[in-house]
Amino acid sequence: MITTNQSEDFELLDKLRLGNRQAFNTIFLKYHAGLLRYGKSLLSNTSHQTDDVVQEVFLKLWNQRNSLIIHSSLSAFLFTALKNKVKDIYREKHLPLYDPTEMQFNEETNVSQSPDNILIFKELNYTIEEMINLLPTKTQLIFRMNREDNLTYDEIASLLNLTRNSVKTHMFRAIKFLKEHYGHYKSQH
């Protein structure tokens, strides 16, 4: 079953194959933050190296746009390309694996409403972000890959070398934790 997100991605890929730079920019804006987050979870070096690796993935996408064959989804293709690039780096330089403990993400809110609504939205968004940051590292990464990067459980399982059931368990725990803590937050405000 093709989702709306996948349908949009296939349209973007068709345009990309024709050399449409706007389609490339749209893909870049849609997936850049998630790829950076995933790259930081894999690399032990500075964010500069992560930026470089993510840029290489997008450069490869642009350079190979005419011959791209994507069987699953664009998101899975990009995340897998990043994972393979990081594996190459490990092979070349024998870098230690990185277990992310502190990840910070700032997403701009684009809300054209009254100042009060914007403030309420920002406070709620901040609170939810704080709750997500309380999740165990792997659970947090899986939750973000699913909810923010739109990866399926199977795609996440493949990228993180986990079983689908393990991914489902992490998602169940994350959602349960967030519901419980959000309920507690709401009762205080």
Image (tube, rainbow, N blue to C red):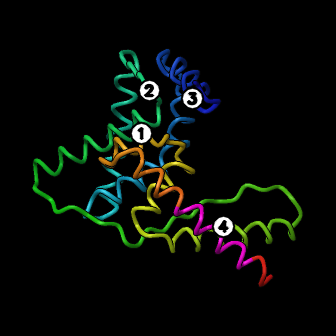
Q: What residue type is labelled 2?
A: Ser
Residue 50: where, in percent of width, then height?
Answer: 33, 55
Numbered disc in front, either 2 or 4: 4
Residue 99: where, in percent of width, then height?
Answer: 30, 66
Residue 174: where, in percent of width, then height?
Answer: 54, 63
Q: Earlier in the sequence, mark 2 or mark 3?
A: 3
Residue 147 position (above or below residue 154)? below
Residue range in magenta is: 173-185
Residue 116 position (above or below residue 27)? below
Q: Which of marks 2 and 4 is nearer the N terminus?
A: 2
How far is disc 2 from disc 4 in space, using C-alphas?
Answer: 31 Å
Residue 21: where, in percent of width, then height?
Answer: 52, 27
Q: Is residue 180 left or right of residue 159?
A: right
Q: Do the residues labelled 1 and 2 touch (CB within 8 Å)?
A: yes
Q: How crowded is mark 2: few (under 14 residues within 10 Å), some or many (20 or more)?
A: few
How far is disc 4 from disc 1 in space, using C-alphas?
Answer: 25 Å
Q: Is residue 188 left or right of residue 16?
A: right
Residue placed under numbered mark 1 in the picture:
155
Q: Residues within 10 Å of mark 4 (few under 14, many from 20)?
A: few
